Image: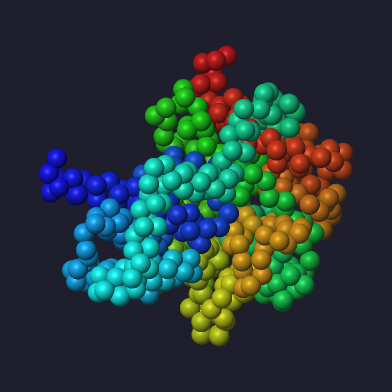
Amino acid sequence: MPIVRTVPFRFVRSFLSFFLVCFTVAFLVMSKREFDEVTINQVLFHMQLMKDNIVTMPGDFIHVFLWHVRNAVLCALTFAFLREAAVRRQEKPGLLFAAVCLAFVALWFIVPGSFIDDAFVAVRWIVVAALVISAAGAAGLAGRLARFPARVVHWLSGGWRLAGIWFGILLYSMFYVNFFTFFQEQAVLGDFYTEGAYIDPRTVKVSGTGTKNLIIIYCESIEDTFGRSDVMGEDLLAPLRPSIETPDLRIDQMPGADFTIGGIVASQCGIPLKSISILSGNLTGWALDRYLPGAVCLGDYLKADGYHNVYYNGSSGVFSGLNKFFLSHGYQEFMGKEDWIEKKHVDPATMNTWAMYDSDMVDRSIARIDELMAEGKKFSFALSTMDTHEPGFLSPPCVDEGFSENWSGYVKCSLSQVERLLRHIRDKGWEDKFVILVMGDHQARMAEMDNVELKHVKGRYVLCSLQRDATLKPVRSIITHFDLFPTLLTALGFSVQGERLGFGYNVFSSDVQPEANYRDRLRKRVLSHSKVYESLWLPEYAERDE
């Protein structure tokens, strides 16, 4: 075959092989940088909403993703070029080869731009050194050393070595997201939901009526750990102390409640959030058009009791199916990023790349709560803060007040805005009219926070403060997201038959309590394959099997 046809084919094949490896590494680095602790369950669940996720992906995330794609392409082109040089080593490289090497050196500084990962910096200098040495060889310098980089690249790409490298990286990635543990759980015999751990709310009588309004504030990535000066160097929860001196509850995070929508669903429905369509062959083609239609959640009970339910969110309401969840379960009002912009309540120019700033969210929340109070009807109001979502943001008022541009500043700024809302309730003299839950949606996912390695901290719990009637005393301090479902109903004045809903136990009940190893059992089995869980998403399948 003529060389004019074989060389391009060989180069393209080399490029594609190297790109597969480079992109896998780049994607892993990006995942660790942006989210750190991402589980395969979270990945699979979001894959089910991939169409909506792509449409609503925040600009910052898209920028970071494209940055890594560009660098993967550059890496692949460079390695394919060096490999081709090694294949054609019988030919004496000339000045053209040297010029191409130096052109690649320039690209390694131009393509990445100003946004640089630490890992990429190290790789860049190694590759630049290899290119400079190769260029020197073309100019008659460096002798045998000049052929070394090309030979190394050629050796690595020879035989099954490159495939082995890629497989090793892929294997590490799968361990990193607990891929094997998750699928091992699916193979466990028996259905955890039918073994007494799960109580179907559809079979439970909830009587009485709500006597107070409800406010739930989901604080993005906020842990009880942040209040430990021995760990963080200072009390990052200090802005909340006027309203929350010492919370008497702490949340032990369970699987399926370890990302935002998972934590919200777990606290409102008493169940985890996990993928089912990818793991269930008979559900091929299933789409998230209805959100847990077989489940009964907090909003469903409140709506039936005459509550007007509202949820305010600063980020996309489509991302993760957040709007579908709330509007499917008793919430009459939902506002997400798209709604704020469409109704011209917020100028997109005043938002950050991820969401509305927390200062703006609190302003709008206070205004709506005042309106609801003036109407004189029972209501629940939930909102989520967003400034402490990766990579972290500082609300404009906090910039003016001199808050630091680091994680401690982001946390304290965000919580100062939450405290502003709580202070507004106090100033109005409305404390006795509300049950107020301030909680983290999940643990912080950053591996390191201002030089504190969170992964090595023992006893990490999610923040949880429940302001309620003083006569309600918790019988235990460590709870799960699931426990909040029956606990909130009790705090509002309802009576829950059997004191249990979903996987949750009413924290105020001394008669019905979980066994000593209950949380360990949940951690091991709550994401196991379950026909009962599938029926919550597709109740028609359960009816067909009966």
Image quadrant where residue 453 sits: bottom right
Q: Residue at x 46, y 48 (%)?
A: 165
Q: Residue 457 or 174: which is nearer the viewer?
A: 174
**Picture quarter with the N terminus:** top left
Q: Is residue 143 above or below residue 171?
A: below
Residue found at the very far top of the displayed protein:
546
Q: Is residue 512 above or below residue 145?
A: above
Viewed as shown, does residue 316 lie left or right of 530? left
Image quadrant where residue 543 sits: top right
Image spot of residue 284 (x, y percent): 42, 27
Q: Residue 77 or 117: which is nearer the viewer?
A: 77
Q: Residue at x 85, y 49 (%)?
A: 475
Viewed as shown, does residue 76 lie left or right of 368? left
Q: Residue 51 or 153: which is nearer the viewer?
A: 153
- Residue 425 in view in this figure: no
Image quadrant where residue 184 sits: top right
Q: Residue 322 or 211: which is nearer the viewer?
A: 322
Image spot of residue 525 (x, y percent): 69, 35
Q: Residue at x 58, y 72 (%)?
A: 407
What's the image's color scheme?
A: rainbow
Viewed as shown, does residue 413 lie left or right of 245? left
- Residue 78 in view in this figure: yes
